[in-house]
Amino acid sequence: MKLPPLRWLAVLPGALLTLPVMVALWGHVFLPTANDDWTTYHLDNSRAGNYSEGAKPSGAVMAWARSNLDGPVYAEPLVFHGLVYVVTENDSLYALSASTGKVAWHLQLAAPAINPIIHCTAIVPLGITSTPVIDPANSRLYTAGVVDTRDGRPRYQTWLFAIDLATRSVAFHVRVDGPGADIDGYNQRGALTLTGGRVYVPFGGRPGDCGVFHGVITSVLAADGSQMVTFQDTAGDVTGGGFWAAGGLAVASSGDLLAASGNALNRGSFCGAAFQLQDTVMRLSPNLALMPVDYWTPPNWRQLDCLDDDIGAIVPTLLDDTGLIFQSGKAGWVYLLREWSLGHTTPAPFSADLKAGECRGGAAFDGQRVFVGCEGGLFALRLDPAGPALRLPGRGGWRQTAPGCDAEPPIVVAGTVWWLDRCHVLHASDAEAGRPIFTYNVGSGNHFATPSAAAGMVFVPTDRGVTAFAIRSTSSTPSPGAPG
């Protein structure tokens, strides 16, 4: 079939909306870090979001803000070699200077879906929603977006783009929808995963489980987009079971993939679906074999189905070398699972009800505590590996709330938890005690927004851009050469 022409736009650096701040202030120095890159959702394939370099900060100051990109931003910003990479719903990729926010270059990859409006989504235009992934070894960025092919069959398709960051050009693009996939029901929300020379693309449903969809993961070779393989959980009259968490998939220490699925429906009804791996944490082989290597399903999965309480609302998070996996979901319960023996339908080794409403997107782990954002606020749960157990607020953990505003997925930077609430306020909280360190209203944003960090900076996605903050630590004397 005839495909629409791809449009490559080279854009000269634009004017800043906010001038960059000075790199040092009297009594404070901005923190250098050893690691200057953040190349995948929550830093690495554990999805633990723990950026440990640097001294513990005492605060932050806004460095720059850019809010005039060509579409809404839902993805986490990525950082590589001094540039912040941001994707938009207009199927665009921007490279911004990490230090100033100026546009270094910009590619519009394709035409997003605009007209007719897909009836199952409120996102218009509908282009790139998920977080991309960067391969540092080959300086390639991979991103997936909905494309309006105009005269293709079907008209709307999901394409994976491989962008050569050295030449600022597309190395290849390939359709990655699963067999029979219909964009009206399928949603590519989850972050992309790069491991073992393959790119993995998870698919779930749209808000309210509108339309017909199944839980699907596709994968192609990172080198050239060939050899697509597919995993699907539900089938036939049993629909749903989507892989829609913003964090996408994690990678186990074995190299297997870790995925969490959502609720299933029976001919459109939220109750009565037969078990087909819905509301389940799975270990999947890298070649996406027909059946999981291992899985765990909570004993109350039927109730979760009926209440639309997806386990798959949050990506599984590996807890360093403890052999444990953290999982939560829309029911507000938290679980610890054993990586090497998930347990099938037996109760989890540890479970507890946070009584916090829905927990969604992704968690973070600093080696001692799990941090998870829920409707009821940000929770810090202290890990007891011997139990295994998680100590809840009041028993060794803590909770921070923003009244009336859900907590979004957090990250950890040098002993400080950075998180947004649904009212678009950025928070920095002491990881050990929960003491507030810094807050700033960034003014706008989209659901499941999560920051990234690199080189002493925190980068926060906003509605149509990024706001950057310089982290600072207290010093009794000004650094050499700092203005007085």
Image: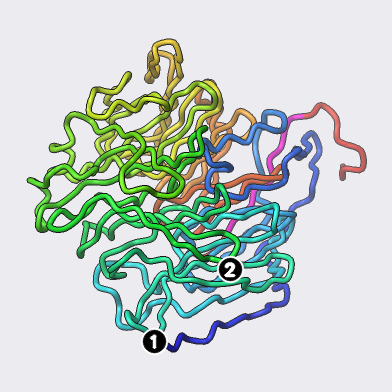
**Residue 111 to residue 56: above or below:** below
Label 2 sits on a secondary structure element that is: strand
The foreground one among 48 and 442 is 48
Q: Is residue 469 magenta?
A: yes
x and y percentages locating residue 14 in the rendered image: 70, 73
**Disc 1 versus disc 2: nearer the observer:** 1
Question: Residue at the location (18% across, 39% down)?
Answer: 304
Q: Amino acid at mark 1?
A: Arg
- Estimate how packed mark 2 is, as few (under 14), some (14 to 19) or many (20 or more) residues with alpha carbons within 10 Å: many
Q: Is residue 73 magenta?
A: no
* Magenta stretch, overall SS: strand
Residue 69 location, quadrant: bottom right
Magenta part of the chain: 466-474
Q: Is residue 101 above or below residue 331?
A: below
* Residue topped by disc 1: 150
Q: Is residue 238 left or right of residue 446?
A: left
Residue 42 is situated, as x and y percent measured from the top left of the image, at: 54, 43
In the image, 451 versus 195, the foreground residue is 195
Q: Is residue 171 left or right of residue 119?
A: right
Q: Quadrant of the N terminus?
A: bottom left
Whichever of labels 1 and 2 marks the residue nearer the N terminus, that label is 2
Q: Is residue 358 left or right of residue 11?
A: left
Q: Residue at x 78, y 37 (%)?
A: 29
Name the disc covering residue 93, or none.
2
Determine whether the residue tagged by mark 1 lies in a helix, strand or loop: loop
Tag 2: amino acid: Leu
Which of the pair 153/23 is nearer the observer? 153
Q: Residues within 10 Å of mark 1 (few under 14, many from 20)?
A: some
